[in-house]
Image (spheres, coloured by chain):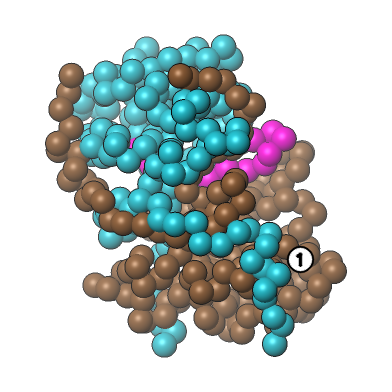
Chain colours: A cyan, B brown
C-alpha cells in the first residue's frame, strides 16, 4: 500500500565519493554520497556539502576540488574521513595525493581507481544547510588496471554506495542491457 | 599505473530514476542516472537533463516534476522510457500514476517503491548541452511493504544503477557499517 511519509531525499543507490581540497595549504578529504554529474562534452560534478564542513573553505578559496571514486578496500579510510572533521583532525596524510597539470589545488588520491580534478564554476546557496558546488572536470585519471575496452570496469573498480540504513553496499550483478531490454516492453 | 584519459563524468554507481512531468496535459517519463539530492531539513533533488528531452517542456512550464525510484522488476519499462522520446511516442500509459496534495502536475508512479513530488525551484543552464533542474521535495510516498524500521529497505526496494558499459547493475551486499568501520582506520 502507498503511504505518505515525511518528505525525504530517498535516492538509491547513492554513490560514495571522496572530495579533496587544499585547506590552508594542506589536503583535506570529505566523504559524501550526495553527488552527481551533468553533461558529456563539458562534464561537470555537482556536489552537495553541509555548510559546517572544513573542506568547503578550501573549495571556495581555491575554486578547485577533486572527486575520487573509492574502491571497497578503501572503506575504512573513506568512513574515517566521513567521521572526522578537518577542524579537529589533520586528514592530510590519510591518502597519498598527486596533482594534475591544470590545477595545483585539487589534491587527487593516488590509490583511488578513478579521480578527477575540477574547477569550481558555480556555488549555489539556498540559504539553509548545504552548499551545492558545481565543478567543471578538467582532468580525469584512472588506474589502467581497472579499464576494460577503455572504460572503467565496475567489477574492477568495486565502487560502493551509502544508504540511510547507515551501511555501505557493494555493486551486485549486471542484470540487464541498457537500450536493449526496453525492446521487450509491451504496451498495455 | 595512473593514466590520464579524456575528461569524463565517471561516477560509480549512478542511480537510475524516472522523472515524471505533465507535458501538454499528459504524463511523460524520462529515465536518468545523473541525479542527486541535497539537504535534509529542506530536501531537494538535482536532476541533469539533456536539452532535447521532451519532459523538460513540462518541468519548465509547470514548475513541477516527480522523481521515482524503480525496482529491478520495472527494468524493461524503465529502459523503454530511456529509449523512446515523448516527441515520437506517447509514454503516458507506461505507468499508472497518482498525484499528491501539493502539486497537480507531478505525476508519480504507483508501482514505484518510492516516489517524490518536487516543485522546481531553480533551473541552471551553462549554455551547453544540459539543464540542471533543482526541485524541492514536497511529498514522499512509499510502498509500505518496502519499509524496515521505518526506512526503505534496500533489499526490498531493489533499486539499480546504470554504468557507461551500457548495463544496469543490481545492488550487492552490505559489507561495512558507516560511522563505525572508520574506527578501524589506523593512521600511518
Q: Quadrant of residue A97?
A: top left
Residue B125: quadrant of the picture: top right
**Residue that badge 1 annotates:** B84
Q: Is residue B30 visible?
A: no
How many labels sit on residues?
Answer: 1
Which residue is at 56% across, 62% downward? A176
Classify the position of the N terminus of chain A by image quarter.
bottom left
Q: Residue at x 36, y 76 (%)?
A: B146
Hey, which residue is sitting farthest right in the picture? Answer: B88
What secondary structure is marked by label 1? loop
Q: Residue at x 35, y 34 (%)?
A: A30
Magenta region: A31-43
Residue A40 among magenta residues: yes
* Quadrant of the image occupied by residue B76: bottom right
On screen, residue B36 above or below A175: above
Residue B95, x across and y down, in percent:
63, 80
- Whether A180 is among the magenta residues is no
In this orientation, which residue lies closer to the viewer: B187 or B173?
B173
Q: Residue at 35% across / 51% down in the picture? A: A170
Q: Residues within 10 Å of mark 1 (few under 14, many from 20)?
A: some
How far across and down, in percent of the image, does residue B167 sit? 57, 54
Q: Could you tell me which chain the residue with mark 1 belongs to?
A: B
Q: Vertically, is B68 above or below A117?
A: below
List x then y, in percent, for residue A76.
23, 37
Left or right: residue A14 versus residue B181 is: right
Extreme residue toward the front, this view? A149
Question: A72 or A150, which is in the foreground?
Answer: A150
In percent of width and height, residue B5 lies at 60, 24
Q: Is residue B96 visible?
A: yes
A148 to the left or right of A33? right
Amino acid at each position: 500500500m502507498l503511504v505518505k511519509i515525511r518528505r525525504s531525499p530517498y535516492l538509491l543507490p547513492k554513490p560514495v565519493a571522496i572530495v579533496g581540497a587544499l585547506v590552508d595549504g594542506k589536503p583535506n578529504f570529505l566523504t559524501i554520497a550526495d553527488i552527481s554529474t551533468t553533461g558529456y562534452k563539458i562534464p561537470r560534478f555537482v556536489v552537495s556539502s553541509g555548510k559546517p564542513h572544513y573542506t568547503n573553505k578550501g573549495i571556495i578559496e581555491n575554486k578547485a576540488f577533486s572527486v575520487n571514486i573509492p574502491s571497497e578496500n578503501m572503506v575504512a579510510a573513506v568512513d574515517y574521513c566521513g567521521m572526522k572533521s578537518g577542524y579537529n583532525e589533520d586528514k592530510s596524510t590519510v591518502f597519498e595525493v598527486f596533482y594534475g597539470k591544470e590545477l595545483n589545488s585539487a589534491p587527487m588520491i593516488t590509490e583511488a581507481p578513478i579521480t578527477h580534478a575540477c574547477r569550481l564554476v558555480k556555488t549555489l546557496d539556498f540559504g539553509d544547510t548545504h552548499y551545492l558546488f558545481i565543478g567543471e572536470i578538467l582532468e580525469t585519471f584512472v588506474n589502467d588496471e581497472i579499464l576494460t575496452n577503455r572504460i572503467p570496469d565496475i567489477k574492477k573498480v568495486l565502487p560502493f554506495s551509502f544508504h540511510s540504513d547507515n551501511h555501505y553496499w557493494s555493486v551486485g550483478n549486471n542484470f540487464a542491457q541498457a537500450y536493449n531490454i526496453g525492446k521487450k516492453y509491451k504496451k498495455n
